[in-house]
Amino acid sequence: MWCDQAVPGGSIVLEFSGDVRPTPARFSVQVGVNEHIHPDDDALTNGNALRFAWRFLNHSCAPNCRVAGRVLVALRDLVAGEELTFDYNATEWSMAEPFACACGACGGSIVRGFAHLDAQARERRRDWIAEHLLERLRDEDA
Ligand SMILES: [Zn+2]
């Protein structure tokens, strides 16, 4: 998915909307400790394609956006035409369908979710880890 206009860093780029379910799937995005937003079943029909454009957001280990609750926020100034990316390892606790990363920044790691990262990999993501993952970590430590 591409940025259609210049966006200042820190701005909301889009809002995730769809069905909230307790379990992840291939095209869902985790937005809460037990909340995963899924595109509606008719996401690609009836004029809904734009509303669910977020389902085409690609992963990057060096992302230009982060997920905060149910919105996507620019991590830095974005220019029109730039591809929007976020770090699935910083939103998903454990991926429904892990995959080999092709972002070019990591040398081809397997993206499985935050639960599977070592301490160093977590620390590298400190500026864009979703709050619900930190919340879950605190719950586990308690
Ligand atoms: Zn990568």
Image (cartoon, rainbow, N blue to C red):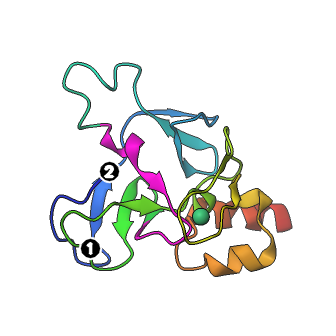
- Name the amino acid type tagged 2: Met
Above or below, 111 relative to 60: above
Q: Residue at x 75, y 68 (%)?
A: 138
Q: Is residue 142 visible?
A: no
For ligand 1, the image quadrant comes to bottom right
Q: Which residue is drawn at 66% across and 39% down?
A: 97
Q: Residue at x 32, y 76 (%)?
A: 10
Span shown in magenta: 52-65
Q: Is mark 2 on a helix, strand or loop?
A: loop
Q: Where is residue 103 in the image (x, y as percent from the top left)?
A: 53, 62
Q: In which quarter of the image is residue 101?
A: bottom right
- Name the amino acid type tagged 1: Leu
Q: What element carries label 1?
A: loop
Q: Where is residue 114 in the image (x, y as percent from the top left)?
A: 70, 60
Provide the residue designation for mark 1.
78
Above or below, 52 relative to 71: above
Q: Position of residue 27 (x, y in %)?
A: 51, 36
Provide the residue designation for mark 2.
1
The numbered mark, 2 or 1, whose residue comes first in the sequence reads 2
Left or right? Give the position of 24 relative to 121.
left
Q: Is residue 91 visible?
A: yes
Q: Residue at x 45, y 52 (%)?
A: 58
Q: Position of residue 66 (x, y in %)?
A: 45, 66
